[in-house]
Image (cartoon, grey):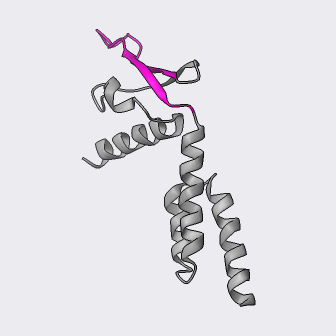
Amino acid sequence: MIKIDENLQSLREIAEAGVKKDMGQMMEQVAAQPQNTHAYWAAVEAQKDEAMSEPKVVSAVIGPMPKNMRDDMPKVTATFDDGETKELFSFYPDEITFVESELLGLTRKQVGELRTRKDVAYLRS
């Protein structure tokens, strides 16, 4: 019984720290201790709570698209449900593209992850 309590405590610590880590890394740590399914669900709930508390994109402006080589790259500017409007990043439109609909409902972190996935997919192509 003490061993289970110790494992649950260590997994709770993993779950709490996991809120600040990438979900994949956190799940790998939890999966390494399969006898503690309670900690797995605690980690999943912690991730959901974090995502629910972060502001989400309610509208986005993408552009303007460059007309020639000297123009600036297009920018993604998002307005969040807390009223904040923020320029998130610029991108090379000949490599990756974005549309507003794919950003709606995402948190700032999720938008960054989307950009990274698109960059990686382009680089691997």
Residue 68 part of the magenta-drawn span? yes
Which residue occupies the foreground of this view, 50 or 21?
Answer: 50
Q: Outermost residue toward the left?
A: 125
Magenta region = 55-80
| The quadrant where residue 1 appears | bottom right
What residue sits 52% from the left and 81% below the top? 34
Q: Residue at x 52, y 39 (%)?
A: 109
The correct choice, above or below, for 41 with respect to 57 in the image is: below
Does 56 lie within the magenta span? yes
Depth order, front residue of 102/52: 52
Q: Position of residue 51 (x, y in %)?
A: 54, 44
How many badges with numbers are in the image? 0
Residue 46 sits above or below residue 63 on the image:
below
Q: Which quadrant holds residue 117?
A: top left
Horizontal side of 11 relative to 35 (left or right) equals right
Q: Is residue 122 above or below residue 71?
A: below
Q: Is residue 63 left or right of residue 87?
A: left
Is any part of residue 65 visible from this angle? yes
Visible residue check, residue 75:
no
Q: Provide residue 110's location: percent of width, then percent of height.
A: 47, 40
Residue located at (53% from left, 24% from top):
81
- Where is residue 39 drawn, in percent x and y? 60, 71
Above or below, 94 against 124 in this view is above
Apparent side of residue 89 relative to residue 10 in the rendered image (left or right): left
Along the line of sight, the residue nearer the viewer: 75 or 73: 75
Q: Nearer the viewer, residue 19 or 114?
A: 19
Residue shown at 53%/62% (left/top)?
Answer: 25
Provide residue 70's location: percent of width, then percent of height. 37, 10
